[in-house]
Image: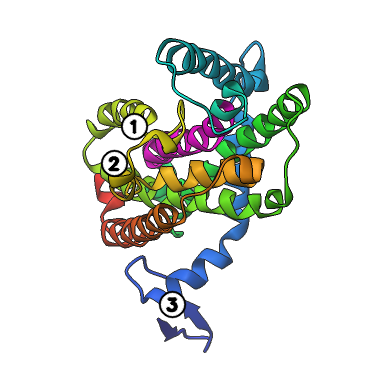
Amino acid sequence: MHSSTPHSEQLLVIEPGGRAHHYWYDLWRYRELFLILAWRDVSVRYKQTVIGLLWALIRPLLTMVVFTIIFGRVAGLPSDGPIPYALMVFAGLLPWSLFAASINDAANSLIENERLISKVYFPRLIIPAATIIAALIDLAIGLLLLVIMMVVYQTLPSWQILLLPGFLLLAFITSLGPGLWLSALNLKYRDVRYIIPFSIQIGLYISPVGFSSSVIPEQWRLIYALNPMVGVIDGFRWALFGGQSPLYWPGFLISVSVALLLLWLGVRRFRDMERSLADWV
């Protein structure tokens, strides 16, 4: 809204309840703040830890060992064709770890930035979105280890590896939608923080991380694909291993549709609740 001052200058007042196109323009204007917050989250993620970034390797490695023993050895579940079971599990853990870390960090982001929210206006959507950058750094480190594992297991990628950035974007979208909604919900109802880790733990076992989604009976695969992480994980493996890990396209399209729907709902719910964020601090 513009108003004239005694010196005939123009004063621009930006309010959180402004029209949508103003809001998205503000997101671009505050892009430097987004980068600053993202860098801060990355720099403090492993601050004052003994082994620092090595935690980004240790956690998925230990989980891979446990899953390989439980699902591969004890349960006897098959891998995707000739792909070594440990390699298949680790390839599924990388996008799942991105999703889990993004959801958890985004959900707590507004609470951790309460002072910033109450003092100055900027599009609050920047805060939970910036937290996902730190999870992307962990993913990049994990990908380096995955390359080493593929060399050790003598597994070469096919041309589909060129499509891997697209599946990384899909993982980002799948994480952002629920993360936005949970961040605002967690600020209003503080007990949400206790539900999120439990839900993530359940999601780990019902998503095709420790097993291939091909073990799901054919008549249930479309329903199973309603879990958007099914499409993300299957697509990730397909991009890495090509024909050795075939992609179930009908289920993949359902997962992508659900991910986009969750993104739209997440942004919409966040925008509806954003006007009250400062009051909940």
Residue under numbered circle 2 = 187
Left or right of residue 219, residue 114 in this image:
right
Q: Residue at x 35, y 25 (%)?
A: 201
Which amino acid type is marked by label 1?
Answer: Ile
Left or right of residue 31, residue 191 in this image:
left
Res. 281 visible in picture: no
Percent x, y for residue 12? 47, 77
Which is more toward the observer, 99 or 186?
99
Indicate which disc, 3 or 1, sits on the residue closer to the N terminus.
Answer: 3
Percent x, y for residue 194? 27, 26
Res. 200 visible in picture: yes
Residue under numbered circle 3 = 21
Is residue 40 inside the magenta stretch? no
- The image quadrant that residue 243 belongs to is top right
Indicate which disc, 2 or 3, sits on the residue closer to the N terminus.
Answer: 3
Residue under numbered circle 1 = 206
Indicate which disc, 2 or 1, sits on the residue closer to the N terminus.
Answer: 2
Where disc 3 sits, the SS reads: helix
Where disc 2 sits, the SS reads: helix
* Closer to viewer: mark 3 or mark 1: 1
Q: Main secondary structure of the magenta part?
A: helix
Q: For the magenta stretch, what is the residue range? A: 90-114
Which quarter shows the N terminus? Answer: bottom left
Q: CA distance from mark 2 to mark 1?
A: 28 Å
Circle 3 crowding by C-alpha within 10 Å: few under 14, some 14–19, many from 20: few
Where disc 1 sits, the SS reads: helix
Which is more toward the observer, 70 or 180?
70
Q: CA distance from mark 2 to mark 3?
A: 26 Å
